[in-house]
Amino acid sequence: MPKKMQAIVLGVMCLVLSIGICVQIKTTNNNGKTNEDKELNNLKTQVLKIKEKYNESYHKLTNAQNELEKVRENVANSDEQLKKIKEKIDKYNTLLGVTDIKGQGVRVTVSDVSATNKIASFVNSKDIVMSDVDILEMVNEFKNAGAEAIEVNGQRIIPNTSICYKDNIILINGKKVTSPITISAIGFSKGMTTINRPGGYLDYWLRDTKHLNTTFKEEKNIEMKKYIEIPVFKYAKTVN
């Protein structure tokens, strides 16, 4: 075979081999991407199923509680003594935070200074974050001022609520809360405005934290959602 023909054949073989290698690489990459997409879709499907199951369970619980409330009302309307018992149960449920409520009150909102604010460059970042101790003090101040119910960033404060600082985040009822921090309190609003008076706690607390943005306002209708988780008592037992 002439050398020229050999060179042509060899060139064609190299071209075919190169095309084959490229096709193989592309196929491998596509298979890898397909597997990743399939795994991601499976995870999304599992999350959606779990969320759907949670929503269904929560819906059933809400319906059951509504039915129970209707039964209580029917029974209470037929007996004056049972009506008084129902009123006590409602009060205890409000105290425990396991029922939706609304009423007059006040809100305090505290937010960190913006990073674009010139003062931020002169302030230590750890000093512009409202700490767990600050929130706890504010909650106690509202209790002392007569608050009947308190909520922080949507987290209802119940008798055994924990407010703590862990891994650079604030946890309330085990849930993460971030700035801005909004503390809502239902009660006699005029009485709770003492917290915002000159020389009051809020004024005292802000003396060393003027770089925080704070608002305080009275509201005629504050709504709070119930605490949906059931507290677990390991050591406290009912005395018969």
Image (cartoon, rainbow, N blue to C red):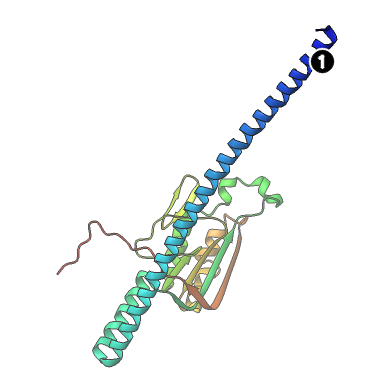
Residue lying at 66% horizontally and 54% vertically, measured from the top left: 114
Q: Where is residue 206 in the image (x, y as percent from the top left)?
A: 56, 59
Q: In this view, does 184 lie above or below 103?
A: above
| Residue at 41% from the left image edge and 58% from the top image edge | 173
| Local crowd size for mark 1, using a 10 Å CA cut-off: few (<14), some (14–19), many (≥20) | few
Q: In which quarter of the image is the N terminus?
A: top right
Percent of width and height locating residue 136: 44, 59
Would residue 114 appear left or right of 161 to someone viewing this image? right
Residue 164 percent across, percent down from the top left:
43, 52
Nearer to us in this view, 67 or 33: 33
Please tell me which residue lies in front, 9 or 105.
Answer: 9
Q: What x and y, as percent, mark residue 35? A: 55, 40
* The quarter of the displayed image where residue 12 is located: top right
Q: Mark 1 points at which residue?
A: 8
What is the residue that sits farthest to the right in this orientation? Answer: 4
Q: What element carries label 1?
A: helix
Q: Residue at point 47% right, 52% down? A: 46
Q: What residue type is labelled 1?
A: Ile
Q: Which residue lies furthest to the left in this view?
A: 240
Is 200 in front, or is 145? Answer: 145
Asked whether 40 or 199 is in front, the reply is 40
Q: From the viewer's perspective, tell me whether residue 223 is left or right of residue 232.
A: right
State left or right for residue 58 relative to residue 130. left
